[in-house]
Image (tube, grey):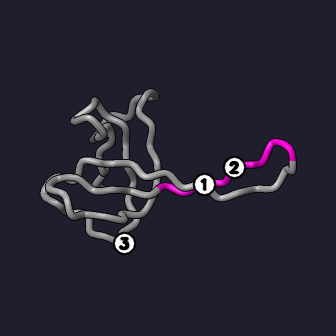
């Protein structure tokens, strides 16, 4: 059983690229309210996540969790249940 600590951020998104070795690019979409016009807008952000053994493939829905920095741009890991 894995412990969950409160300082670990978890996000859900879609794998958009799995071409790198042991790394996947995950696109996370969220809704943000415009401060002036009060309209909800869709915002996406791409995260590099550790993908051990290249198990997650392009198009899959995944959960990523923050971890220690593994490289210059990679500070998340894909959670496999």
The residue drawn where x is 36% and y is 65% is 16
Residue nearest the observer in this picture, 17 or 7 = 17
Q: CA distance from mark 3 to mark 2?
A: 24 Å
Within 10 Å of disc 2 (Cα), the crowding (few <14, some 14-19, many 20+) is few
Q: Where's residue 28, x and y in %? A: 49, 55
- Cβ–Cβ under 8 Å for marks 1 and 2: yes
- Cβ–Cβ under 8 Å for marks 3 and 2: no
Chain-order first, disc 1 or disc 2: 2
Chain-order first, disc 1 or disc 3: 1
Within 10 Å of disc 3 (Cα), the crowding (few <14, some 14-19, many 20+) is few
Res 33 label: none
Which quadrant would the C terminus be assigned to in this image? Answer: bottom left
- Residue range of the region highlighted in magenta in the rendering: 28-36
The residue drawn where x is 30% and y is 39% is 73
Disc 2 target residue: 32
Q: Is residue 2 above or below residue 49?
A: above
């Amino acid at each position: 059983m894995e412990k969950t600590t409160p300082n670990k951020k978890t996000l859900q998104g879609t794998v958009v690229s799995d071409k790198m070795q042991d790394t996947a690019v995950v696109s996370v979409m969220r809704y943000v309210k415009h401060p002036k016009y009060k309209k909800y807008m869709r915002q996406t952000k791409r995260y590099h996540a550790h993908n051990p053994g290249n198990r997650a493939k392009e198009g899959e829905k995944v959960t990523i969790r923050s971890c220690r920095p593994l490289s210059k741009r990679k500070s998340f890991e894909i959670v496999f249940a």
